[in-house]
Amino acid sequence: MLYWDYAAATPPYEEVVQTMEQIMKLHYANPSSLHRAGVEAGKLIRRSREVCAAALAVKPEELLFTSGATESNNLAIKGAALQYEGRGRHIVTTEMEHPSVYESCLQLQKRGWEISFIKPERTGIVDPDRVAAAVRRDTVLVSVMHVNNEVGTIQPLREIGNLIKSLNSRVLFHVDGVQGYGKLSVSLKEWKADLYSLSPHKIRGPRGVGLLYVKEGVMLSPLLTGGSHEDGLRAGTENVPAIVAAAKAVRMSGEQREAFADRLTPLRDRLLHFLRGIPEFLLNSNEDGAPHIVHFSYPGMKGEVMARKLEELGMAVSTQSACSSLLAEPSRVLLSMSRDVSAASGGIRISLGDIHTEADVTALEQAIMTAVQALKIVEGGMK
Ligand code: PLP
């Protein structure tokens, strides 16, 4: 089976697996314990925080470890909302955010918050002027993702950050950075980001751990209360093996970012070119997007049918994002990009990783041709 679902989960680096095993065996002490073993475990967390901070060019005190980016996004949005409710009850976000952002906003909406959901252009890119136009004096937070997890479009974060801060200097800017880190350059300073979420399992790190950058001076109301872990922002005994391994993945994938992009961009472009040759397909991604995501729709054919056929042919692809693929509903992301229900129900996401080769792409192209013919999708035009 060839795996084309890197945007959903990645195989951990060998070093990550070894680190997890080693730390689980050797450093099982509770980092809050006062004895030596506990102090040693605490030191490992401190060191890991420093490694992640160096990779993001931020201060170690500005980073906290969570259980994953879903938690980081929930904490960024609801934590800021609860903390700064006195400033207003308005949030600006987009129609194409990951469910962990989108649903957090909907939950607040049910509690009386006003949420402005900005519709992206047909290209899947959000117009910074539209975001800016929605910002008001009582806006507490703007949340826009770096790279969309379904179609791979890259949002103009620098323009958005600068515009919104020029309109309202107190507004907080949250970026869901999950699909961008390790693939594109990240500059929290240039974006004027106050909050930034990361997920190590998307960058060949472990699951069960996430990161949240909280700019110095920004306060959040914790969602999990209990002990004083993570500066009182996230109670619960720290997952030391996952944190140390996460730092490894953050460092390694950060260092390999350019090599990753250089390697994958030609493969992605080749796939895009191939898919454009199939008249029944509608491309939802292009060469301007992230190097690891290719997305197309076959209007009239459910994405699951195509995905199952490709699986029979040895190719593991995805329909929507992993978090939404069980819903069997048209993709909210594609609908936001003005695709009709038929196209939004027939999406296929191919996401690439650093293991992929030209030969793999050839095999995938052949499988797509076979699947298309087997499903009698294409009546003519294909050789
Ligand atoms: N944000 C984006 C853009 C994602 O792609 C994902 C995972 O699919 C998440 C957030 C959630 O990350 P996690 O799986 O760490 O909860």
Image (cartoon, helix red, strand yellow):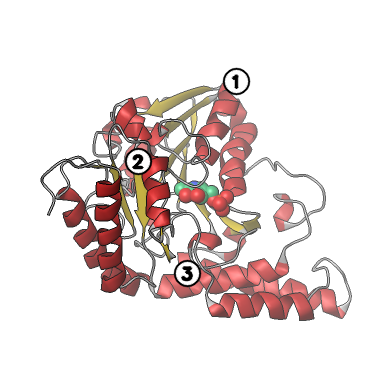
Extreme-right residue of the structure = 35
Which callout, 2 or 1, points at the residue further toward the start of the chain? 1
Give, as a three-letter code, the residue at label 2. Answer: Gly
Name the residue carrying label 3.
Answer: 55
Mark 1 closeness class: few <14, some 14–19, many ≥20 residues within 10 Å: few
Residue 300 at x, y percent in the picture: 30, 31
Q: Helix, strand or loop at disc 1? A: helix
- Residue 305: numbered disc: none
Give, as a three-letter code, the residue at label 1. Answer: Lys
Rounded to the nearest angstrom, the CA distance separating label 1 from label 3 is: 38 Å
Q: Left or right: 227 with respect to 304?
A: right
Residue 357 at x, y percent in the picture: 31, 73
Q: Left or right: 75 with respect to 261?
A: right
The one nearer the camera, 14 or 298, is 298
Nearer the observer: mark 2 or 3; the answer is 2
Q: Look at 63% across and 80% down and name the residue there.
A: 18
Q: Left or right: 190 with respect to 26?
A: left
- Residue 347: numbered disc: 2
Residue 37 at x, y percent in the picture: 84, 78
Name the residue carrying label 1.
Answer: 110
Extreme-top residue of the structure = 112
Q: Helix, strand or loop at disc 2? A: strand
Which callout, 1 or 3, points at the residue further toward the start of the chain? 3
Q: Left or right: 379 with respect to 263?
A: left
The one nearer the camera, 98 or 85, is 98
